Amino acid sequence: MRLVDAHTHISLAQQEQATELAQRGVWQLVTATHPEECARVFDLAKTSQRIIPTCGLHPWRAADFNPRVLEDCLQKVPIVGEIGLDTVWTDVPLDVQLKAFLCQLQLAVTLGKPVVLHTKGAEAEVLHWLSRYLPPKVVVHWYSGEAKYLPSYIELGCYFTLGPDVHTNQTVQAVCRQVPLDRLLTETDGTEAVAWALGEPYTLAVVPQVLLNTLATAARLRGGTLAEMQAAVYANSFAFLSDIKGTPVCN
């Protein structure tokens, strides 16, 4: 299918469907948002080479920060995340989030592992720390922050996923237009996020169509064809994954 969901959440009830998607050719970077979820995501990844686990302590769950447990988890995972800061969608105090974020960011740098980044309302703060502790590769998932910070993230070499609301969200459209073509990726953020963004329920079975719709809109915004955009994003995904041990080469 030459499709990549570069950031998604798979529930326990969806695991069989996720494996079926992988068998159909859809690559999925599946996120655990807490160390307790890591084992389940690792087990899911064993079902297909097209399912790649990413693990970290999500800022919404930063109150559970335990550096020893986190370090053990991040030692094992190929990609760290999603990690970051959020002042919009959570009541967890920023100083609590910051301790967890900096611990994980510094570990990612030490371990030489890529990071999936969450930032909402804290773009300046995240940028401040990212400029000091920069992992080998960073993907900013579904960026919807102020446009004035976008060039600085681009300058750091970040990749950016386009969320499923690219059809209507002007901020996501700005990301699509401004980010270099070779650093654009696609994501769903899971079926609940797709339902939230598009206003109707979705199942994993329609993920390929959601990703294709995103690619089609991105192609229109960039003045290219769907085939060109799909090929570019597929290649970009493997460029991001290229340093991960055991990840097949794009073909």
Image: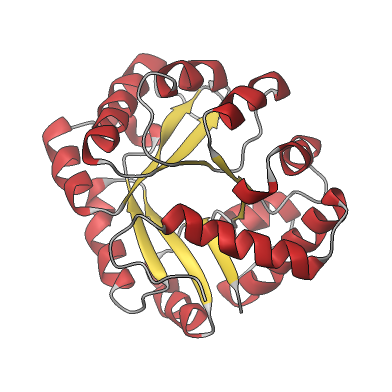
Q: Is residue 150 above or below residue 83?
A: above
- Position of 21 with respect to 34 (left or right) is right
Residue 159 lies, in percent from the top left, at 55, 43
Q: What residue do we see at 28% from left, 75% from top? A: 46
The quarter of the rendered structure image containing the N terminus is bottom right
Vertical arrangement, residue 24 with respect to residue 132, above or below = below
Q: Is 105 on the left-hand or right-hand side of 226?
A: left
In the displayed structure, 58 sits above or below 17; it is above
**Going 47% across and 83% down the picture, which residue do you hit?**
20
Q: Is residue 190 visible?
A: no
Q: Tell me where residue 116 sits by quadrant.
A: top left
x and y percentages locating residue 74 in the rendered image: 22, 45
- Which residue occupies the foreground of this view, 73 or 1? 1
- Whole-percent x, y for residue 241 in the image: 42, 57
Residue at image position (32%, 31%) is 105
At which x and y percent is residue 126? 47, 22
Total marks in image: 0
Viewer-proximal residue among 32 and 196: 32
Q: How is the image coloured?
A: secondary structure
What is the quadrant of residue 133 in the picture?
A: top left
Give the left or right position of residue 176, taking residue 55 as reference: right
Instruction: Determine if residue 117 is in view.
Output: yes
**111 or 30, which is in the foreground?**
111
Q: Is residue 134 above or below residue 26?
A: above
